[in-house]
Amino acid sequence: MLERSTGFHVGSFAHLLMLAGILRCGYDSVTYENVQYPNKVRAHPDIPDNEIALAGIVLGYHSDDKVNLHRSPRSGGRGDFNDHIRRE
C-alpha cells in the first residue's frame, strides 16, 4: 500500500539522483519520455499488472547527434539545464 507521501519521496530521490549524475559524473538525464509509453516500459522489466512503476530515469552522456538537437515548441524556452546549476 502506498502512503500519501510516496510520490514526494520518489520525486525527491529522482531529483537528487539526476543532480548527482550531472554534477559528479557528467550524466544527462531523461525523466518524462518513458512515462508517455507505460505499456512499453512495463513490458521490458516484466512488471506485473498488480504493480506500478513510480518513476523511470534514463541516465547517460549527452550526444550532439542530430536527433537530440530537436526542440519541441512546447518546451517553453527553458534553456539548457546546465544554465540553472551553480558550480563552485
Image (cartoon, helix red, strand yellow):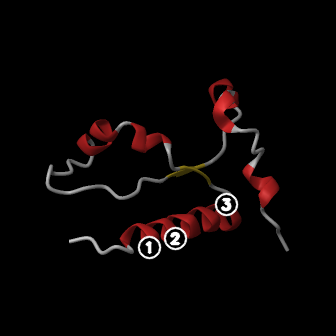
Residue that sits furthest to the front in the current view: 4
Q: Earlier in the sequence, mark 3 or mark 1?
A: 1
User: For residue 75, what is the image quadrant?
Assistant: top right
Residue 50 locus on image (x, y percent) = 14, 55
Residue 78 locus on image (x, y percent) = 75, 45
Query: Pointer 2 and pointer 1: residues touching (CB < 8 Å)?
Result: yes
Query: Pointer 2 and pointer 3: residues touching (CB < 8 Å)?
Result: no
15 shown above or below 35 = below
Q: Residues within 10 Å of mark 3 (few under 14, many from 20)?
A: some
- Pick the residue in front: 65 or 79: 79
Q: Residues within 10 Å of mark 2 (few under 14, many from 20)?
A: few
User: For residue 71, what is the image quadrant?
Assistant: top right
Q: Amino acid at mark 2?
A: Ser
Q: Residues within 10 Å of mark 1 (few under 14, many from 20)?
A: few
Q: CA distance from mark 2 to mark 3?
A: 16 Å
Q: Which residue is mark 2?
A: 12
Q: Quadrant of the C terminus?
A: bottom right
Q: Which mark is residue 22?
A: 3
83 shown above or below 36 = below
Q: Which residue is mark 1?
A: 9
